[in-house]
Structures are given as structure tokens and as C-alpha cells.
Amino acid sequence: MKKSKFIILIAVIVIISIISFMVYDFFGNKSTEQTNVYEYNIEDLKQIDSSLVKYSEIQQIKPNIEGIKALAIDKNDNLYISGSNKILIYNKDANLLKEFTHGKEVLSMTISPDSEIYLGARDHIEIWNKEGNLINSWKVLNEKVLITSIVVTDSSVFVADAGNKIVYHYNLKGEFLNEIGRKDSIAEIPGFIIPSPYFDLAINSNEELWVANPGRHSFESYTPEGRLISSWERTSMEIDGFSGCCNPSHFAFLSDGSYVTSEKGIVRIKIHNQAGDFKCVVATPNQFDDDTKGLDLAVDSKDRIFVLDPKKVLIRIFGRK
């Protein structure tokens, strides 16, 4: 009897030892820091092959202004900078020509063919002349309006509203004409996805209206009446595409129709050709402070690229190497 009890005791000890070893092997014998094979290393993505960088920074402008949000260039290559309460105007040689106070929170700005200054003052449009006089204004009649971009042609004003995820078309008198980009499955319009207040639009040299759809990492071209003409999309964590919740954040056109784009998250500026294919890099992530966002862009007649850097409070000018 004693021998049977002894054998049972030994068996129990062996079983407990085996179970303990298995538990330790499964739960305890692991590194506290494990690599997720599906996780991208952001620091690795910030490293860009220098052979892809075809531009260099050639000049900086340090404006005497707070809260810089928007920049624009007119047909004479004058530079306009808008901040928390005023506008600065520089000539093509970066000499300050004029400044005046507008006293508004301005998120976007453009210059009309007649050299009038259009400001997106959150929920309404204001038009000023270069002397600092208010010419006209009109309110966007919608709730949750957040005007993030404006472009003006000889006959039309197009306004991007990130709050309502739509583009409005007005005439030069401020009379509403139509909406652009509302989701329509019959017209094959996908609808804009705008997770954050970055929603840009621009007119190229062919007078085509292009709108960034940052939630889809795409660009879409529309007629003034709102018909979708064409689009292209590049979703990728690599340098040839756009990633994150909402990129590109801003864009502008070079004279050959190529797109200059800026991104947040992985902060960089690059160029895509008219078909959307990646061409080259203008500025790399290591040229900006961490968490920089809101890199507004403009291009002058010499295809110099102007970048508004709100973190460093600088206008940075890039030229082809």
C-alpha cells in the first residue's frame, strides 16, 4: 500500500513539473519586446534615397507674423502670407512691399487674375485689394463650414469646405451656382473623405479644376458644373504614394502640369507627373520638425516651390538642383 502511494506521489510530481514547464515555455519564455511583422517602422520610412531628391532649399523668408496659415503667389510673382490677423506682401526678390491687418482667422488664401486677395475666413469669403481695403464678402450658407482652400478663375470661385466635405461653385459676385463632389453612385462620384481639416484644390495651366481627396489618397478633376472628368489614386507607405488618414494635405501645379504635394505624418514634399506617377522628392522628413503639418504650397513662374512651414514660422523656397 505504501509503495502504491509513493508511486502515485511521484507521478503527481512529474505531471506538475511537466505542466509547469509548458506554462513557462508558453507564457514566460518570451521577450518583453516583440516585433510585429505587420507593423511599419516609421523611422525607416523617413529615410529617403538621396538620389531621389532633385531639389534643394535656396532661400528662406522669416515673416514678422504670428500663426501663419496660408500663402499665395500672384501673376507677377509677388508673395502673399496670411497669419492670425494680417497679410504681408513681398515682391519676387523677397522684399516686403506692404502689410495690412484683416483681423480674421484665415485658413486659406488665393489671388485672383485681377490681383484681388480672396481669404477663407473659416465660414465666409472675404475679398481685399492690395491696399488693404475690403471689397466684398459672403457667407457660406451651411452648418459646420470650414473653408480650407479657394481658387479663382476669370468667371468662377471654387471653395473647399472640409466641414461639410464638399466644394462650392460661385460666380465672381458671390452668387452660389452648384456643388461639386457630393457622393453619387449613378454619376460614379465616390465622395470626399476628409478626416481632418486638410482639403485642397487647384487649377492647372489647362484651366482644369483638381481636388485632393485625402481620405482616398487621390486626386479628382471636375467640370465647373460638377461632372467628374478623371482621377488618379496612389495609396502606399512607400515614397511613390500617400498614406495615413488624410494625405496629401496640400498641392500645387508646376508649369508642365506635374503635382507638387505635401504630406503630414511622414512629413515630405514630392512631385508626381500628370498621370500620377512619382517623379522625385523636393524635401525629406529630416528637413522638418517632428509633427509639422499644414505645409501650404505655391509655385511661381520660374517653377520655384514655396513652402509654408508653420512650425518654424518660415517660408522656404526650393529650386531644382
Image: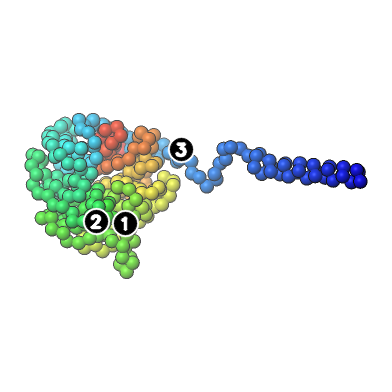
Left or right, 5 with respect to 205, comes to right
Disc 1 crowd rating (10 Å Cα; few below 14, some 14-19, many 20+) is many
* SS for callout 2: strand
* SS for callout 1: loop
Residue drawn where x is 8% and y is 39% of the image: 131
For the residues bearing labels 2 and 1, Cβ distance under 8 angstroms: yes
Q: Earlier in the sequence, mark 2 or mark 1?
A: 2
Point out which mark residue 288 bears: none
Disc 2 crowd rating (10 Å Cα; few below 14, some 14-19, many 20+) is many
Question: Which residue position is annotated with label 2?
Answer: 167
Check the picture and name the quadrant holding the C terminus: top left
By what rule are the colours in the image chosen? rainbow
Q: Quadrant of residue 96?
A: top left
Q: CA distance from mark 2 to mark 1?
A: 9 Å
Q: Give how far across and how far down residue 135 sits, in percent.
A: 8, 47
In-front residue for pair 303/203: 203
Residue drawn where x is 32% and y is 35% of the image: 56
Q: Earlier in the sequence, mark 3 or mark 1?
A: 3
Point out which mark residue 43 bears: 3
Residue drawn where x is 24% and y is 56% of the image: 167
Q: Is residue 60 above or below residue 261?
A: above
Task: Name the residue type under label 2.
Answer: Val
Q: Quadrant of residue 13?
A: top right
Question: Which residue position is annotated with label 1?
Answer: 192
Q: Earlier in the sequence, mark 3 or mark 2?
A: 3
Residue drawn where x is 91% and y is 46% of the image: 1
Is residue 180 visible in the rendered image? The answer is yes
Task: Name the residue type under label 3.
Answer: Glu
Task: Name the residue type under label 1.
Answer: Phe
Q: Give how far across and how far down residue 162 sits, in percent.
A: 27, 51
For the residues bearing labels 3 and 2, Cβ distance under 8 angstroms: no
